[in-house]
Amino acid sequence: MSPVEMNLEARFDAYVAEEKKIEPKDWMPDAYRKTLIRQISQHAHSEIVGMLPEGNWISRAPSLKRKAILLAKVQDEAGHGLYLYSAAETLGVTRDQMLQDLHAGKAKYSSIFNYPTLTWADMGAVGWLVDGAAIMNQVPLCKCSYGPYARAMVRVCKEESFHQRQGFQVMLNLAQGTPEQKAMAQDALNRWWWPSLMMFGPSDADSPHSAQSMKWNIKRFSNDELRQRFVDMTVPQSELLGLTLPDPDLKWNEERGHYDFGAINWDEFYNVIKGNGPCNKERLGARVKAYEDGAWVRDAANAYATKEAARQKNANASTHAA
Amino acid sequence: MSESKHEWPLWEVFIRSRQGLGHKHAGSLHAADAQMAIQNARDVYTRRQEGVSIWVVPAEAITASSPDDKDVLFDPANDKVYRHPTFYKLPDEVNNM
């Protein structure tokens, strides 16, 4: 490393240590840039793929009100994906490159979206648990050391709050409904609980990027810490709903001041990440199809813009000539 | 064969949140032309009445100062404390000047 680079790196380290933000044109270590591109693009992909399980229920929502809410929520997810793609682009990666990586199966997205949404109650469970876990992960990112990512996350977090609340309300309505409705809510909870806990990622010991990301102030809390917080927050909410979390080992630990919970099936987690979840192929297929089906629209808009620009130029030229 | 190898250009989006305030950078997006950039900005950045006016600027049209010039550009202001009102200690009688 040259003296100039050492100097730059020292300044970067000092900035991060002082909780200052790094902005796009500031010098940053290559590994920091790569880590952010990977994390932000994965995050963006998760928002975009995350539209699919809920999109499934837009045309099947039980009322016009629920349909309007679900539409707004799915539109928000699209917006969140776009904020995040933009933030990643400030690091020098192109949108096309990110989409290619997603479509080629090279880029990852949150494995939770590879599970199917089988009943209307899943819209409740997804909002309550999946968005709840996402918020738990995302709030600390509002203070991440990279400015554009932090700013995007502030917007995302503000908007996510309605997502979780509407989900809880769906669960509440079902839990207070007929026995069949309550059973439907319980079934959704049974299916979404464990995958939601997996959303926080592998245990700290098995999380390859965690330590470095903590040092760079990209990550503020460990996966296990956030997961514990989520469990502690969710248990009383499930009691309020009168539903049972599907974990026989779940119990309050007076000494720790936290809930103990059962072992997570990490084999399942890694298997879904590897592409063997119930919906991996369907999700990626839907994204690729949407992209390919939209190609003529992108081309047409480009052609129109080029033509319009030429027309403008000619018009200006003739005005000047006159 | 599709010619969509060229992605739509990048636009920076500035939003005036209400009358009386300046436009503030909100983020960026891709669009084929200015009109589409405005429409996309409306959908991406003002879903909750965050704005009453939108500017879109082609990202490549922006000239930015370099972080390396930070010292040259901004340090000279550092030792001119007399530009701030608190530099002047005045008698209590003129407290609110």
Image (cartoon, grey):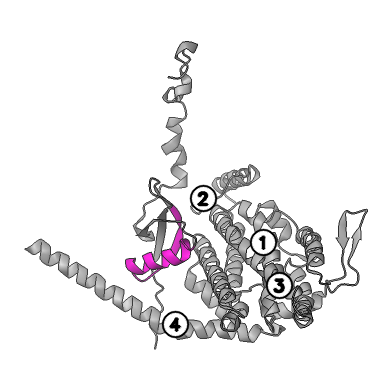
Residue at 11 percent across and 67 percent down: it is A318
SS for dot 3: helix
Q: Earlier in the sequence, mark 2 or mark 1?
A: 2
Front: mark 2 or 1: 1
Q: Given this view, does label 3 or label 2 mark the residue nearer the observer? A: 3
Mark 4 or 2, nearer chain start: 2
The kind of secondary structure element at disc 4 is loop
C-alpha span from label 3 to label 1:
23 Å
Q: In this figure, which residue is indicated by the disc labeled 2? A: A26
Q: Residues within 10 Å of mark 4 (few under 14, many from 20)?
A: few
What SS does tag 2 mark? Answer: loop
- Judging from the image, mark 1 belongs to the subunit labelled A
> Mark 4 — residue?
A294
Q: CA distance from mark 2 to mark 1?
A: 29 Å
Name the mark on residue A173.
3
Q: Which residues are magenta?
A: B25-47
- Answer whether residue A281 is magenta in the image: no
In the rendered image, residues at marks 3 and 1 fall on the same chain? yes
Q: Are marks 2 and 1 on the same chain?
A: yes
Q: Chain of mark 4?
A: A
At x 37%, y 80%, the residue is A299
Q: Residue furthest left?
A: A322
- Pointer 3 local density, CA inside 10 Å: few below 14, some 14–19, many at least 20: some
Q: Quadrant of the C terminus of chain A?
A: bottom left
Q: Are marks 1 and 4 on the same chain?
A: yes
Q: Is residue A182 above or below residue A151?
A: below
Residue at label 1?
A135
- Label 3 – label 2 distance at C-alpha: 50 Å
Which residue is at the front of the view, B78 or B96? B96
Find residue A314 and name its label: none
User: Which chain contains the residue that carries disc 2?
Assistant: A
Give the amino acid type for the residue marked by disc 1 in the picture: Ile
